[in-house]
Amino acid sequence: MGGSWHIAAEMALADLRLERIVQEGSGPFERTHRLDRPSLVYLPATGGAPALGCFGEARSHRAFTPFGTAVVVPAHTLLRVRSPGFAARDMLILRFEEAAFQALTGLDASASQTELSACADVRAAPVLAPLERLAVEMARPATARETIVAGLGLVALGELARHFEAS
């Protein structure tokens, strides 16, 4: 059972689309995703075991590694997910404009397995800080929300570029 979900809030800006997704509790499940835009998924801890992921075809069960607090998914890249299940949770998905994302991070559908492995577990504090603030902004309407969200999206992308440069 994969658990139901709905988009609780969304915002489309010039080079960034954000979605706050609320997922109901779930039992174990497996899913496959292929996103049309490079994305950064923020998965705040729920207290349970983390989901496992694998980019591309899984040649064995060892291909699946635990997801971190944030997961980067290059556009047009196959992502397989195995989840042990979880309690109800919110997650945030930032979908970037493809050319800018690729220019800054160097990541695209031709990324190596080493590069993709680094995408499954992003825990760098400078990347997570703007994601935490974005989660707050997306959960409630407030004055200048669009401006703040646009700025935080750019900060997250810039910090992500620095994170992959240092890796």
Image (cartoon, helix red, strand yellow):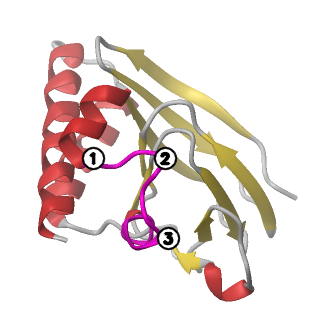
The mark nearer the N terminus, 2 or 3, is 3
Q: What numbered label is drawn on residue 131?
A: 1
Q: Is residue 37 visible?
A: yes
Which span is picked out in magenta?
106-118
Is 59 included in the stretch rendered in magenta? no
Q: Residue at x 29, y 18 (%)?
A: 15
The mark nearer the N terminus, 1 or 2, is 2
Which mark's residue is nearer the viewer, 3 or 1?
3
Amino acid of disc 2: Ala
Q: CA distance from mark 1 to mark 2?
A: 24 Å
**For the residue carrying disc 1, how many other residues have a C-alpha within 10 Å: few (<14), some (14-19), or many (20+)?**
many
Amino acid of disc 1: Leu
Q: Position of residue 143 (x, y in %)?
A: 18, 13
Q: Are marks 3 and 1 in contact (CB under 8 Å)?
A: no
Which mark's residue is nearer the viewer, 2 or 3?
2
Q: Residue at x 57, y 40 (%)?
A: 76
